[in-house]
Amino acid sequence: MNAIRVSAFGEPAVLDYVEVPTLSREPGQVLVRLHAAGVNPVEAYVRAGKYARLPALPYTPGTDGAGVVAAADDAGLVGKRVYTAGSVTGTYAEEALCTPEQVHPLPDHVSYEQGAALGVPYATAAWALFKRGGARAGETLLIHGASGGVGLAAVQLAKEAGLRIIGTAGTAEGIELILRNGAEAAFNHHDADYLSRMQAAVGGSGFDIILEMMANKNLGKDLPLLAKYGRVVVVGSRGPVEIDARNLMLREADIRGITLFSATPADLVEIHGRIGAGLADGALAPVIGASVPLREAARAHELIMGSGARGKIVLTM
């Protein structure tokens, strides 16, 4: 089969498209024939060797994918459409081995590309909103960087949960996408007055929750936007940032970091139960920003680390 292999950490060019031996399933594993794989920023950090947890070389990247079960201990699973949230062997490949807990049903009305966009983005958004953010119906939510995979997932999940949503993006297309997916208002973070306009959009009372995708740029600006007892949940950051802690003290506010690695098996069952219910009733519908052939994984990594995100980037087999 064909797969992407990384033999040395480095620039996107280290993502080699090669033929590898057919996978051999062990008892307890599920073999999934993949139609699409999701591309996440963390995979770019790992590929570059700039992440706290690095795999042994060589390896195949990827945790998210979607396809059809080709083999499993449970014969009733064979032929079923599934999405993966985790993998034993990596999903940048035509096939992947998974544990049963990493495989989830994919409704017929959800495409394979959309299924590949679920694992990390939707689980991260749910974890950030409900576990770390404590989101409740009626609260005001700012998603700072709402047009990417995690941001749009958060918009859809928050809308379903009854929050008031404001989002930011860097392009007119991104703003339109945020609004179309359920935000009450959206602002271009390149505009000089966007912070004051966002504050005005919620009547000057501030935000109960802010999801922050680029803390190194925005965290210092986020804190003055918080309401009393507000929470900033840091989903992403690419470096250090300076803040004025008095903005936290005055509001008795919190900054909360997240990593999906902290989720327990029970947490993941709850998260994917929420995702499955949202898929079934149509409340959740992943937006695909770009579909890239598997052999062009290097280009997908360049796209995922660029600016102006408009939905999820996926690889197709």
Image (cartoon, rainbow, N blue to C red):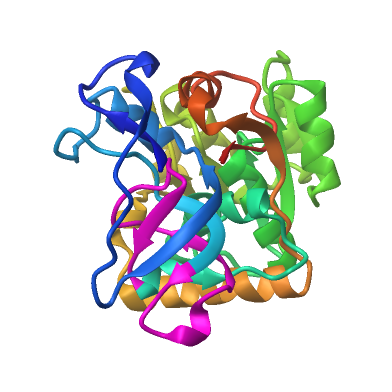
- The reply to whether residue 316 is visible in this rendering is yes
Position above or below: 215 against 117: above
| Residue sitting nearer the eye, 71 or 154 | 71
| Residue sitting nearer the eye, 10 or 60 | 60
Position above or below: 315 against 72: above
First to last magenta residue range: 70-99
| Quarter holding residue 148 | top right
Position above or below: 124 against 276: above
- Residue 121 falls inside the magenta stretch: no
From the top left corner, tell me how far across and down residue 224 is, in percent.
54, 34
- Residue 93 falls inside the magenta stretch: yes
From the top left corner, tell me how far across and down residue 72 is, in percent.
39, 76
Q: Quadrant of the N terminus?
A: top left
Q: Quadrant of the C terminus?
A: top right
- The reply to whether residue 230 is visible in this rendering is no
Position above or below: 40 against 90: above
